[in-house]
Image: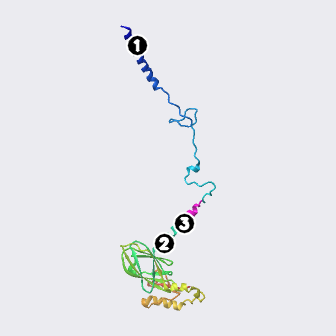
Amino acid sequence: MNHTQIRTRLTTRHLLTLCLVATPALAQTPHPLPGPGAVPELGALPGQVPAVSFTPLAQQAQGAAAPGTPAPATVPAAARTAPASQATDKRRTHSNADRIEHTLFDRRPVAVTLRVDQERLVRLPFPVMLEVPPELTGVLEAQMIEDTAYLTALEPIRRSRVLAHALDGSAVIPLDIYASDKGDAKAELEVHYPSAESAGATGGASADQPEPARPDMVQLTRHAAQALYSPRRLLRPLPGVRQVALSRSPVALYRDAKVITAPLGAWTSGELFV
């Protein structure tokens, strides 16, 4: 082996050694440190506080008021909710007004349409007592509270006449009741009386007039007899007289006699009763 071959082998070994040494050195080459104020990707280096930039609040808020401009007045919560509550009350008032059906009694019977198993309110111009015909017994439920009649039909009803007598005997309003199981439920019905409206319009003038005298015992007895035995078309209301509820169960009126007695009716005028 000559010197040239030995020198070539030595050179090849040195190159391989340099390559092996250079590869780990390149892998461990340090990266340049971030400059001051820059935040590293994985956090701040130990002992180094990252710089934080502050932005004024005036620049963050868009459309912020300039210094010296007075702040807008704060509207109280009650003031904000007041218009909404007023609008709700108006809608409720309109809806209640839309549900009431008005009719004027002009000597013609007032038609009252019912739906089966649904109650309907009929408001009259004065407190009344209802005279329900026998054929509507068990078919029509009628309850009077002051000047309002609560009517419920238990089954379909053909046109039937119910009389509404004023408690003071001053007027009678005929009601034609009709009920079916079809159609929508009717709204509340309010009946207006012409004489009541005229009396309300002239209330100031009539207030000074003396109250008319009440019927005496003779007039009360005559009216009770007419109510029992005279035809309905001939019966005229007597102001100050009204019929009262009465139990029709037998009473012991006579002693030691085989007689069954039962009351037929009762009428009153003030403190007088027949």
Q: Residues within 10 Å of mark 2 (few under 14, many from 20)?
A: few
User: In front: mark 2 or mark 3?
Assistant: 3
Q: CA distance from mark 2 to mark 3?
A: 16 Å
Residue 93 is at least partly visible in this image: yes
Q: Looking at the image, is 196 positioned above or below residue 20?
A: below
Q: Which residues are magenta?
A: 74-84
Q: Tag on residue 94?
A: 2
User: In front: mark 1 or mark 3?
Assistant: 1
Please give the residue where the numbered disc 1 appears in the rendered image: 10
Tell me if residue 234 is in the magenta stretch: no
Provide the secondary structure element on which disc 2 rests: helix
Please give the residue where the numbered disc 3 appears in the rendered image: 83
Colouring method of the image: rainbow
Query: Looking at the image, which residue is at 56% across and 49% down?
Result: 60
Q: Residues within 10 Å of mark 1 (few under 14, many from 20)?
A: few
Question: Does the residue at mark 2 contact the one at mark 1 (Cβ under 8 Å)?
Answer: no
Side (left or right) of 197 relative to 136: right
Q: Classify residue 262 by image quadrant.
A: bottom left
Callout 3 amino acid:
Pro
Where residue 176 appears, x then y in whole percent?
40, 81
Residue 272 is at least partly visible in this image: no
User: In front: mark 2 or mark 1?
Assistant: 1
Mark nearer the N terminus (1 vs 3): 1
Q: CA distance from mark 1 to mark 3?
A: 102 Å
Mark nearer the N terminus (2 vs 3): 3
In this view, the residue in front, 94 or 257, is: 94
Mark nearer the N terminus (2 vs 1): 1
